[in-house]
Image (spheres, helix red, strand yellow):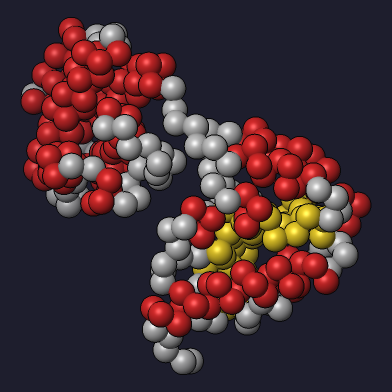
Amino acid sequence: MPVHSPRSHRSALDDRIARLRQLAHADTRLEGVLLYGSWTVGEADAHSDIEAYLYIKDDLLADFDGPGFLAQLAPLELAYTNMYGILAVVFDDLMRGEFHLTPAGPGIDEVPTWRGMVHLPRPDDAVLLDRTGRLTKAARELAGFRPPEPVTTAQRLTDELTNWTLMLAHVLARGEIARAHNLLHAVVAPQQLQLCRLLRDSTAHWLTPSRALEQDLPDTDRRRYVSTTAAAREEDVRTAARDSWRWSRDLAAEAAGRWSVHVPRALHERIAGLLDDPR
């Protein structure tokens, strides 16, 4: 198998998108194709994948061979329906792809409801095929970036961090170190980063808050985040959990000062006590 350089891989992404546009226009079963992800916001690089919605005419969806269609883009090394019901593929140059095979009728109608979750700054570029004009109109609803509403979002995140860190403390008290490690990194940390981003007015990567963290957040926040990470060893996880809760409490206090978020301080103290002495 040939070795592909980062430069050629980046070029391959542009070429693959152009090829997808060509194939889509030639396939009358498709009513529309909409790209999303890093390419549509100008952040694609040598390691980016290709992500798209394929809007198939409603009565033809059941017989549409997704892997067969995508194999025309490039040979497939892997094709399967992933845990989210999305057709995931790996091309022969190791580029990944995620494709939603969606009925055109209800699927295109749903696009405007993504406001606040999906941002398409150049919607006309994101639309590779639109036979009726419906998809372009819908995609333009996503052109303006809508940051999360700060007050209710900060309150929700403060409450979430309280609840999930209490669960973390109970799991640690039970001695389930691997489970606590997973909770800390997969559940608590993303919500901490969202609250941090909200406070720093840096919400462009809201849905994946660890993305571009090194460029988006100040050094002090990055160091606090690093202190919450750990190898799955008992003492390391316990130390990281205590550091994580201290950071959560600091973020919550900052949110309370800025937006009058309610902080259940007595409960917070009891969680800290449980983390310090799990017996």
| Quadrant in which the C terminus is drawn | top left
Instruction: Specify whether 70 is left or right of 248.
Output: right
Residue 268, percent from left and from top: 19, 15
Q: Residue at x 28, y 9 (%)?
A: 260
Task: Between residue 237 and residue 202, name the one nearer to us.
Answer: 202
Q: What is the count of numbered marks? A: 0
Q: Is residue 247 visible?
A: yes
The quadrant holding residue 163 is top left
Please tell me which residue is depicted at 65% across the width and 33% down the height of the picture. 113
> Whole-percent x and y of residue 76?
61, 78
Q: Residue furthest bottom?
A: 2
Seen at 30% across and 20% down, the residue is 158
Q: Residue furthest right?
A: 59
Q: Is residue 276 above or below residue 64?
A: above
Query: Considering depth in this image, is 64 or 242 the residue closer to the camera?
Result: 64
> Can residue 67 be seen from the camera position used here?
no
Seen in the picture, residue 257 relative to 94 is either above or below; the reply is above
Q: Position of residue 61 (x, y in %)?
A: 83, 55
In front here: 28 or 140?
A: 140
Dividing the picture into quadrants, the one containing residue 164 is: top left
Q: Residue at x 32, y 47 (%)?
A: 210
Horizontal relation, residue 177 to residue 94: left or right: left
Q: Is residue 71 left or right of residue 181?
A: right
**Position in image of residue 21 (x %, y %):** 71, 68
Q: Is residue 94 left or right of residue 212?
A: right
Q: Nearer the viewer, residue 190 or 196?
A: 196
